[in-house]
Image (spheres, rainbow, N blue to C red):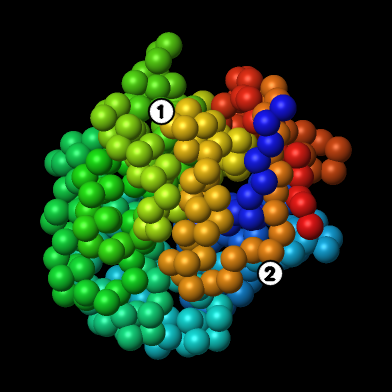
Amino acid sequence: MKELTILKPDDWHLHLREGIVLKNIIRFTSELFGRAIVMPNTKNPITSIKKCISYKKSISEALPENSTFDPLMTIYLTDETKKDELTEGFNKNVFFAAKLYPANATTNSSFGVKKIENLYEVFEVMQELEMPLLIHGEVNDPEVDIFDREEVFIDKELSPLIKKFPKLKIVLEHITTAHAVDFVQDNNLGATITPHHLHINRNAMFFGGLNSDFYCLPVPKREKNRIALRKAATSGKECFFLGTDSAPHLRQWKAFCGCAGIFNSPVAIESYVKVFEEENALDQFEKFASLNGPKFYHLPINKEKIKLVSMSNQIPEFIDVIEGKKVLGQIKPFHGGETLSWRVEGIVK
Ligand SMILES: [Zn+2]
């Protein structure tokens, strides 16, 4: 039996939702990850210090007792974001970073930024503060083909942005294209890569009929892009790090309206390890999962370790969302119904 022990990882891009879903899913992250950057696109987005403090409190209350998990909070940028609020929140350690969603680019992003230029004053301040800017890198122009939106964003929006703010600390989130891989490396940005974009290409969404289980934003792209992402993630290069973009939707909603988002946190580590093993790069996994992120964000690496063993691991088809004793619904995890070949055995002190 093969074993793999690595420093405890962090998840640099996570959706924890709210209420009963938050209470049901947080353990999948808090048990195995040291920290996570929590995305602010809740139904009522986290646009102020007050909302952020209250959201963080609800997360802390949902954590198992004695948990050492550290949620790193973000502010949702809008056309109305005030630089004073942002500065105060950052200086008081309420906001760890700011998230830029172009309006309507993804789930709950209707409050997002309509024109990036509207935020130039805010970026000026962020550059000075060295506050990270996390970007959902897709244009929202309905005339741009959905499969091209990341590339067009990079060329038309991101390129001018980094020229204007060369010292701004930017992470291009959940990258999906070879173009993004190259751009991140050439311009000293950071990038998160999700497990699902390493496993599936765009065919998955159309296999056996329209399949919303694999619908996420940015949408998976052509196979050549998936191959480029796998090379990047397993390269050990410091600019690429783990960010699951795990985004649960109750089954009834996912199946009914096909909301975008893949819930991968119950299986994220095993899912990534499968890719690293297939690419003969198990020795690079710790860099991607546990070292590159802290280095980019200037944070200490985690002290604990996690141990994985290679053994058959049957992933449940669905995970129940429970309130008291009542099952309120189910969420399908990524790889649900599949058998993976690694399993996290637990934390090693
Ligand atoms: Zn996301």
* Quadrant holding the N terminus: top right
Q: What residue type is labelled 2?
A: Lys
In front of the other: label 1 or label 2?
A: 1
Q: Residue 57 carries which label?
A: 2
Query: For the view shown, which residue lies furthest in the top direction?
Result: 208
Structural crowding at the residue carrying mark 2, measured as other residues with C-alpha within 10 Å and reported as few (<14), some (14–19) or many (≥20): few
In contact (CB < 8 Å): disc 1 and disc 2: no
Asked whether mark 2 lies closer than 8 Å to ligand 1, one says no
Q: In which quarter of the image is residue 134?
A: bottom left
Residue 102 badge: none
Neighbor class of circle 1 (other Cα within 10 Å; few <14, some 14-19, many 20+) is some
Q: Name the residue under label 1.
A: 200
> What percent of the width, then of the height, locates residue 273?
55, 36
Name which residue lies at 76% across and 45% down: 346
In front of the other: 46 or 138: 138
Position of residue 41 in the picture relative to residue 239 (left or right):
right
Residue 104 x, y percent position in the rendering:
32, 51
